Amino acid sequence: MTDSVYKVIELVGTSRESFEAAARNAVETAGKSLKDLRVAEVGKLDLKVEDGKVVAYRARVSLSFKYKHE
């Protein structure tokens, strides 16, 4: 087994549907440019409110990916 290093970044995903969709959006969008994604941890959830109504769900996600060193 070789030693590995992982980098952790924080993202905020949004959705008009649900917290789950917001977290998924964050991970899937990051996956378009980052490789070797490992673990996503949802740390905080909040709602965007306008005129007394929920208009968006937001999920703050810590995402780790394998750091490639040459």
Image: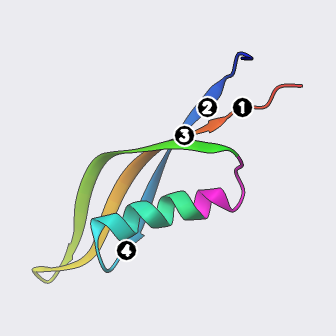
Kindly state the secondary structure of the residue where label 4 is placed: strand
* Residue positioned 28% across, 48% down in the render: 44
Kindly state the secondary structure of the residue where label 3 is placed: strand
Quarter occupied by the C terminus? top right
Closer to the eye: label 1 or 3:
1
- Residues at circles 4 and 3 in contact by the CB criterion of under 8 Å: no
Give the colour scheme of this rendering. rainbow
Kind of residue indicated by mark 1: Tyr
Q: Position of residue 7 (x, y in %)?
A: 61, 31
Per the image, the residue denoted by label 1 is 67
Q: Is residue 23 above or below residue 43?
A: below
Q: CA distance from mark 1 to mark 4?
A: 29 Å
- Residues at circles 2 and 1 in contact by the CB criterion of under 8 Å: yes
Residue at the limit of the structure toward the right, as seen here: 70
Mark positioned earlier in the residue sequence (2 or 4)? 2
Q: Which is nearer the eye, 49 or 33?
A: 33
Q: Is residue 24 above or below residue 11?
A: below
Mark positioned earlier in the residue sequence (1 or 3)? 3
Per the image, the residue denoted by label 3 is 9
Q: Position of residue 35 (x, y in %)?
A: 72, 48
Label annotation for residue 7:
2
Per the image, the residue denoted by label 4 is 15
Circle 3: is it few (<14), some (14-19), or many (20+) Cα within 10 Å? few
- Residues at circles 3 and 2 in contact by the CB criterion of under 8 Å: yes
Q: CA distance from mark 2 to mark 4?
A: 25 Å
Q: Is residue 33 above or below residue 67?
A: below
Mark positioned earlier in the residue sequence (2 or 1)? 2
Q: State yes or no: residue 33 in magenta.
A: yes
Closer to the eye: label 1 or 4:
1
